[in-house]
Image: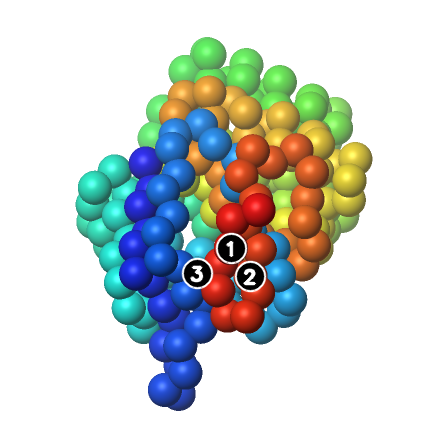
Amino acid sequence: MLKIENFALCFEHERFMLINELHIGSGTKVNIFGDNKTGKSLLLKSIHGDFTKFEGNILIKEKPPTFYKKRKNTILIENVPHLLLNESIWKNIVLPLSKISSHQKQKIMDLCMDADLNDKIGERVKNLSFSSQKFVELIRAVIQLPYLILIDDIDNFFDEKSLLKALNICDFALNSGATLIATSKYKLAHFELVYKVQDKRVVKL
């Protein structure tokens, strides 16, 4: 699914976030943790195709990130919510879908129930807590069944209890072959692969 080889972020003649080789298969939950300002966010943006000042290769299903960008097959969830605040939870979730099948509708309702949002489906997003807004973004991401779901600083908006709910929601997409990569300041439980950023390198634990 994802291959990163001979990778380095480059800024003001400095090389950091060094990755010799990182291969991640479909259906895998990956946690990359480390201190702030070590390059975690830029790594996700590089995988997503939004940042290009790096050395090395990134391949998603053997294609570079920019090949998929217009097809929405990689979804990045950042700290700042990307939502229509004056619209309902439902409208925000279904926004990217051209058509909604009865199966999708039922699945969205199930996922909203998992996130404790099912009784607020018609409520405006601006009235939700920050954590609930991130659940709306997450459900919108997984219902699209992308190749990659990238979540930056996941520990900033999900505590341990809500993180478990979030990972269960992600399983819908992962069971269809998606891969989840989430960054954090500290090592998180319930991830199959864990990498630590230390001494400018990404090290598998």
Q: Quadrant of residue 97?
A: top left
Q: Nearer the viewer, mark 2 or mark 1?
A: 1
Rendered-image quadrant of the N terminus: top left
Q: Residue at x 62, y 18 (%)?
A: 110
Q: Mark 2 — residue?
A: 197
Q: Amino acid at mark 3?
A: Leu
Q: Residue at x 51, y 55 (%)?
A: 203
Q: Amino acid at mark 1?
A: Val
Q: Residue at x 56, y 33 (%)?
A: 192
Circle 3 SS class: helix
Disc ID at residue 43: 3
Q: Residue at x 39, y 87 (%)?
A: 12
Would residue 77 be seen by someone viewing this image from the given angle? no
Q: Residue furthest bottom?
A: 12
Residues tagged 2 and 1 counted as in contact (Cβ below 8 A): yes
Q: Earlier in the sequence, mark 2 or mark 3?
A: 3
Assess disc 2: are there few (<14), some (14-19) or many (≥20) residues with their C-alpha within 10 Å of its C-alpha. many
Picture coordinates of residue 114, whole percent (x, y): 69, 24
Circle 1 SS class: strand
| Nearer to me, 191 or 108 | 191
Q: Mark 1 — residue?
A: 203
Picture coordinates of residue 91, whole percent (x, y): 53, 36
Q: Earlier in the sequence, mark 2 or mark 1?
A: 2
Circle 2 SS class: strand
Q: Amino acid at mark 2?
A: Val
Picture coordinates of residue 200, whole percent (x, y): 50, 70
